[in-house]
Image (cartoon, rainbow, N blue to C red):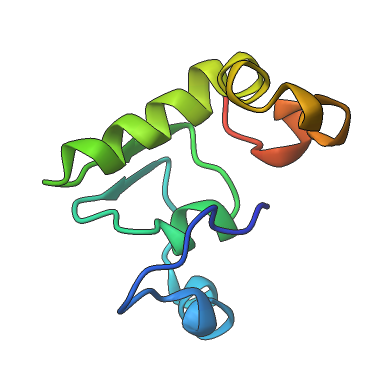
Amino acid sequence: MAMPIILWIGGKRRLADILIPRFPAHSCYVEVFAGAAALFFMRPPAAVEVLNDVNDELVNLYRVVQHHLEESHTDRHPACSALLLPPAELIRRPG
């Protein structure tokens, strides 16, 4: 499980220990209003996972992280490339 990559007002990161154990068994997990997607990142993975948000820039951020994290970061911050965790260690979601 990973931590959220951004902070969000109204996020559920602090409630994760209370909420996640209450989730029923499931094979599909959907975040309709993702925001920081704290519960998405902090819970065990499901076979099918969907993130949605009305904020196009936020959705784009999650797509970049999912598909292009390493090259996006090293292109913009070449001096930090040695400090970047491999994507598999940063986020455990399949691409």
Task: Compare residues 83 and 86 and report the one nearer the observer.
Answer: 83
Q: Is residue 40 left or right of residue 83?
A: left
Q: Residue at x 62, y 26 (%)?
A: 73
Name which quarter of the figure residue 83 lies in: top right
Q: Nearer the viewer, residue 30 or 33?
A: 33
Who's the residue at 71% across and 40% down the image?
90
Q: Is residue 69 visible?
A: yes
Residue at 39%, 26% in the rendered image: 63
Give the percent coordinates (x, y) of residue 93: 57, 33
Q: From what the image shows, is residue 78 above or below residue 61?
A: above
Quadrant in the picture for residue 8: bottom left
Query: Farthest residue toward the right?
Result: 82
In this orientation, which residue lies closer to the viewer: 79 or 43?
A: 79
Tell me residue 39's x, y (percent). Answer: 46, 63
Residue placed at 54% from the left, 75% from the top? 21
Q: Is residue 87 left or right of residue 58?
A: right
Q: Does 61 sit above or below residue 15?
A: above
Residue that extends furthest to the front in the rendered view of this protein: 79
Residue 65, given in percent of the width and then of the height, sits at 51, 30
Residue 95 visible (yes or no):
no
Question: Quick check: 18 left or right of 28?
Answer: right
Residue 32 x, y percent position in the rendering: 19, 51
Could you tell whether 70 is left or right of 39 in the image?
Answer: right
Question: Number of marks in the image?
Answer: 0
